Image (cartoon, rainbow, N blue to C red):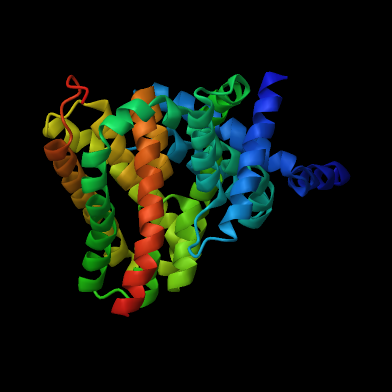
């Protein structure tokens, strides 16, 4: 029962997010707004709701499963952009490696080491 | 005998007439993918998601059903992405102390990292002569898919190409973070998590949760902040430039 009650809480915050998105000038996904609202609620009550914790563990473990259908689609649309494939792949592979390298470098420079909890 | 054959041929259509077929196929492929991943001794260049997606694509190609039949059913499964995103509040709250202590460096580095993630790819594709439609589909490549989809529609890109770009980026980011962090001798799970979330959106975040809970929390933080920042800045910059 705890899991179902937690799921209802998640749905309530998702629905709240969907309502708030209507008022925002930019297109943010309702899930992200719901996540931020839920975090704020936890902060306000000074702890987490046990039901939400019970449902979040299996749901987060399922994330990989939930994004799979999107991955399947690539194999069926790849042909449409075949003539641009070289440019697209080079941009994605090199661009992502470059951005990973620069963000790791930046973070290492700016983040203090873990031992000093300041 | 031929009647039996006709009945047998109708079985896949019956399965995929309701979402049950697509959901069952996705679950089966997922567990098989995880098992194959273990058998292949955890190759970082080929996460279980990709193995499972290849299995599903093969089944769709072999059976007399189309990708649309599968997508219609799988949409029910993807509905859970909404509540699952909200559930990320739990790891986020658990790491709030750490995040609060680090808010200054995060605020300093994250916008620059998120900007670079979009700029490198667009610049390379532009230099190689890609048309605006392709550039608009590549720009939101490091952003979590619900935000990226609405962004690419606003910029005039292709949704299908964007999905492909998202997945390629996610896998490259997972591989890149693993490889470059070893090379740069970075072991801090917070840093690796942030890099995975900023560059590799949901795929990177899933990978970060496999590393540790802390890395996962920082990845969700990196993913959400990159998403919010890009959603605000990208349309503004795009319309100024175009």
Q: Whole-percent x and y of residue B235?
A: 39, 69
Which quarter of the figure has residue B86? top right
Is residue A112 visible in this depiction of the protein?
Answer: yes
Of residue B25 and residue B75, the one placed in the foreground of this image is B75
Question: In this rendering, is residue B80 above or below A98?
Answer: above
Q: Whole-percent x and y of residue B31?
A: 54, 27
Task: Tell me what residue is drawn at x 49 percent, y 41 percent.
Answer: A36
Question: In this rendering, is residue B191 above or below A54?
Answer: below
Quadrant that contains the N terminus of chain B: top right
Count of all numbered marks drawn on residues in the image: 0
Is residue B171 visible in this depiction of the protein?
Answer: no
B7 left or right of A107 in image: right
B236 left or right of B176 in image: right
Of residue A73 and residue A42, the one placed in the foreground of this image is A42
Which quarter of the figure has residue B198? top left
Of residue A42 and residue B147, the one placed in the foreground of this image is A42
Which quarter of the figure has residue B179? top left
Residue extending farthest bottom: B242
Q: Whole-percent x and y of residue B238?
A: 34, 72
Task: Tell me what residue is drawn at x 31 percent, y 27 percent.
Answer: B98
């Amino acid at each position: 029962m705890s899991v179902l009650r937690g799921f209802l809480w998640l749905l309530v915050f998702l629905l709240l997010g969907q309502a708030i998105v209507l008022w925002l000038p930019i297109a943010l996904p309702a899930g992200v707004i719901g996540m931020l609202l839920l975090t704020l609620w936890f902060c306000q009550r000074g702890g987490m709701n046990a039901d939400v914790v019970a449902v979040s563990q299996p749901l987060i473990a399922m994330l990989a499963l939930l994004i799979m259908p999107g991955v399947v689609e690539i194999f069926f649309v790849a042909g449409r952009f075949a003539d641009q494939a070289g440019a697209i792949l080079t941009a994605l592979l090199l661009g992502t490696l470059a951005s990973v390298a620069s963000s790791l470098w930046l973070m290492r420079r700016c983040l203090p080491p873990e031992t000093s909890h300041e | 005998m031929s009647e039996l054959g006709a009945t047998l041929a109708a079985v896949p259509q019956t399965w995929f007439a309701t979402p049950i077929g697509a959901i069952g196929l996705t679950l089966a492929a997922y567990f098989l993918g995880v098992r194959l991943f273990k058998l292949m001794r955890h190759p970082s260049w080929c996460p279980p998601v990709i193995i499972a997606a290849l299995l599903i694509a093969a089944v769709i190609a072999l059976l007399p059903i189309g990708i649309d039949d599968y997508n219609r059913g799988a949409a029910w499964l993807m509905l859970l992405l909404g509540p699952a995103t909200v559930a990320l509040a739990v790891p986020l709250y658990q790491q709030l102390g750490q995040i609060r202590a680090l808010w200054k460096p995060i605020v300093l580095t994250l916008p620059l990292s998120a900007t670079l993630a979009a700029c490198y790819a667009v610049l390379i594709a532009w230099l190689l002569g890609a048309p605006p439609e392709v550039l608009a589909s590549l720009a939101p490549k490091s952003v979590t898919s619900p935000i990226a989809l609405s962004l690419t529609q606003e910029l005039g890109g292709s949704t299908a190409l964007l999905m492909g770009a998202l997945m390629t980026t996610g896998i490259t980011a997972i591989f890149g973070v693993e490889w470059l962090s070893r090379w740069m001798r970075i072991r801090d799970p917070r840093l690796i998590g942030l890099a995975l979330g900023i560059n590799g959106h949901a795929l990177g975040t899933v990978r970060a949760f496999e590393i540790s809970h802390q890395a996962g929390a920082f990845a969700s933080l990196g993913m959400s902040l990159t998403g919010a920042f890009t959603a605000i800045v990208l349309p503004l910059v795009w319309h100024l430039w175009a």
